[in-house]
Amino acid sequence: ADFFRTLEEKSDHGKLRGDYSGCDERYVVQQDWQAYTPEQHALWRRLYQRQAKLVPGRACQVFLDSLAKMDAGDGIPRFDRTSEALRRATGWELVAVPGLVPDQVFFEHLANRRFPVTVWLREPHEFDYIVEPDVFHDFFGHVPLLFNPVFADYMQQYGKGGLKASRLDGLPNLSRLYWYTVEFGLMHTPEGLRAYGAGILSSGGEVEYCLSDPRPRRVAFEVERVMRTLYKIDSFQETYFVIRDFQQLFDETAADFAPLYARLREQEVLPANTLLPGETNIPPNSKSGS
Ligand code: HBI
Ligand code: FE
């Protein structure tokens, strides 16, 4: 508890803002861009080209517009260059991390508009599946949406919520919210369903599956329902939650979660493949074009 208080005091007084003294420095590393080999840059290009072919007509327009401007197809990007553009766009910056960091540290970064990006790239044999997020998942999947002001605000709000959630033992609820939005979220558009989740957009198979496969459920986003729903980390999702737009995501998660966590403690968690009575299973897209 006092660790947490210290963290909050420091971040409230801005002591952590901008410099990485205190608890963060154990997790922030330098991106040694010169150390990446030609083979690693070639692997990045292969991953990038596969996803760049898949996302048109399947990713939300904000993702496509940002990706086009980021020009990240030639090789593993330099985080400091992207941070310059990102700061101008939404006040965010990238911090290089060695991999997954503790929730507390992760939330502290997000609350200060810093997105942690892993520095290592998967091995060639992990082309189709990695257990932990690597630089391709973090950069290709997450960074483009941080150029969108509303989504950028949502991510900071999520970080601040996380710092509170730890005290109210709401972390499992919040992790599900992150999983079913930031990682695997879908959105309604006039042209049909589109993906915005990083776990989908950086995946070779799930981009098409999440939109047009008849097997998974697709349910309208509702924050309490999302927080109750368990998820699988090593298979395609059995349920996707669909938002109208990023404003809805921001508005529906702006409230103080304390009463929500109290209600959730009284309710059963739901298996990943639940469809509750009265819930509409939103129909999949007819087979996407291209
Ligand atoms: N650390 N580097 C990194 N990246 C993540 O996406 C991440 C993390 N730590 C914790 C975490 N995600 C999840 O537990 C979130 O739900 C908080
Ligand atoms: Fe991720």
Image: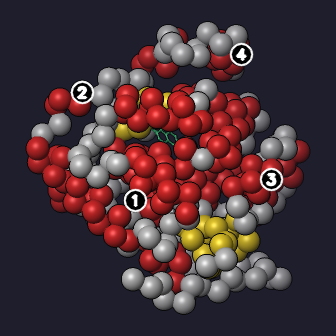
> Mark 3 sits on what residue?
252
Label pair 1/3, CB-CB below 8 angstroms: no
Q: Earlier in the sequence, mark 3 or mark 2?
A: 2
Q: Which of marks 4 and 3 is nearer the N terminus?
A: 4
Q: Is mark 1 within 8 Å of ligand 2?
A: yes
Which mark is nearer the camera, 4 or 2?
2
- The CA distance from mark 4 to mark 2 is 31 Å
Find residue 269 and name its label.
none
For image coordinates 54% across by 16% down, the residue present is 18
199 vs 78: above or below:
below
Q: Element type at marker 2?
A: loop
Question: Could you tell me which quadrant the C terminus lies in?
Answer: bottom left
> Mark 4 sits on what residue?
12
Q: What residue type is labelled 1?
A: Ser
> Mark 2 sits on what residue?
32
- Whole-percent x, y for residue 199 in the image: 46, 58
Which quarter of the figure has residue 188? Answer: bottom right
Label pair 4/1, CB-CB below 8 angstroms: no
> Mark 1 sits on what residue?
202
Q: Which amino acid does label 4 sit on?
A: Asp
Q: In this view, does 36 lie to the left or right of 131?
A: left
- Whole-percent x, y for residue 80 in the image: 37, 28
Q: In this view, does 57 lie to the left or right of 134?
A: right
Q: What residue type is labelled 3?
A: Glu
Q: Element type at marker 3?
A: helix
